[in-house]
Amino acid sequence: MNPVTHHWKAPEDALLPHFIIGGAMKSGTSTLHAMLDRHPDIFIPKEEIGFFDIDNILQHYDFNFYERRSKQWTAQNLEDDPPTYWDWYSAKFEAGKEKVRGEDSTSYLASRFAAQRIAMQDEDIKMIFLLRHPSKRAFSNYHHLVRSGVISRCFEDVIQYQPKTVLERSLYKEQLEQYYKYLPKHRIKVIIFEDLVARPELVLRDVCAFLGVDFEKLDAATFDAYANPGRFPLFPRLYRMKNALNRRFGNTFYLRELPKKAPYLVAQRARLPKLFNRLHGMVNPLKQGRTPKMKPAT
């Protein structure tokens, strides 16, 4: 079935973003979000949204849930109820109705569906992509997935047995080609992560010109607004043990306020065994209100 249908054309009264930070994951998207969020004329919802590929389980394993007792999936599918999904998406931008609206969804660059769906909209949505050294991005992505509760294998095993998990998001050429196929070049901005780190003021000036906002309205502290830095857990093996145990009870770490929810798994998260809760507290001391012992990524 063609994943792009007329249901993906926004209703006339829908609020849409003027720009999207579309990836790549672990390439500075959170930092750029934090910097642009300081601009008085820009509004960006705090969380990632992932709307234009919300039904893509390859990119959004956290948006789809399997209920073991009933042996049923809860999946996000706009075609089941388009008004509910579009209302949910529009509500994300209600607070910024009078501003330049943006969002960030790091799955879009690697998605097979998002480019065509974004191109269908009457709003001329601009796309911003950040690219990082492919190997360093993949390694940082791996540790992010370990910390997030997804990966229970070592990096070498993931590369050998699950290469799409971290390697596919570094295949920038074929991913960008999808966007250049459906969108005009003047609506696409590509930023190199290393440039953002080395010359944030110069990069922000260029981005503001791309978005049509006044660069001079940003204060000096904006250029130090780094967010979500990648770090190695001090005890990665313990993290992976916790992640393997978590799968026995259903992966509920990524539950969000999605249009279609899985009530059973939400309740199940509160009934995890004491042993699991204790182990989770050991490897994630943030839950206990303590500063975690982490060493910086290289």
Image (cartoon, rainbow, N blue to C red):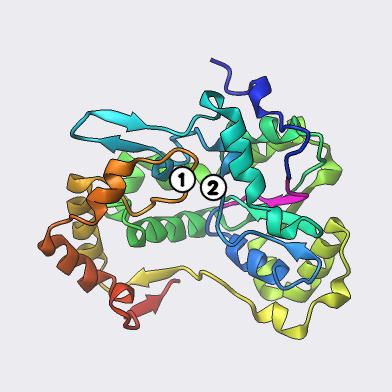
Q: Which residue is drawn at 80% across and 58% down?
A: 100
Q: Residue at x 35, y 62 (%)?
A: 147
Above or below, 164 relative to 128: above
Q: Do the residues labelled 2 and 1 touch (CB within 8 Å)?
A: yes
Please tell me the numbered disc located at residue 28.
Answer: none
* Apparent side of residue 224 relative to residue 290 in the rendered image (left or right): right
Q: Which residue is denoted by mark 2 in the rendering?
A: 170
Q: What secondary structure is the magenta-colored segment mainly?
A: loop
Q: Which quadrant of the view contains residue 205? A: bottom right
Q: Where is residue 34 in the image (x, y as percent from the top left)?
A: 64, 69
Local crowd size for mark 2, using a 10 Å CA cut-off: few (<14), some (14–19), many (≥20): many
Q: Does the magenta stretch include residue 259?
A: no
Q: Nearer the viewer, residue 120 or 227?
A: 120
Q: Which of 266 and 280 is in front in this view?
A: 266
Above or below, 262 relative to 224: above
Label 2 secondary element: helix
Local crowd size for mark 1, using a 10 Å CA cut-off: few (<14), some (14–19), many (≥20): some
Q: Where is residue 153 in the image (x, y as percent from the top left)?
A: 26, 51
* Apparent side of residue 107 relative to residue 65 in the rendered image (left or right): right
Q: Nearer the viewer, residue 27 or 242?
A: 242
- Residue type marked 2: Ser
- Residue type marked 1: Leu
Residue 109 visible, this orientation? no
Q: Which residue is denoted by mark 1 in the rendering?
A: 167
* Apparent side of residue 113 relative to residue 161 in the rendered image (left or right): right
Q: Position of residue 6 (x, y in %)?
A: 68, 21
Label 1 secondary element: loop
Q: Which quadrant of the view contains residue 47? A: bottom right
Residues in magenta, as a range: 16-24
Residue 88 visible, this orientation? yes
Above or below, 8 relative to 98: above
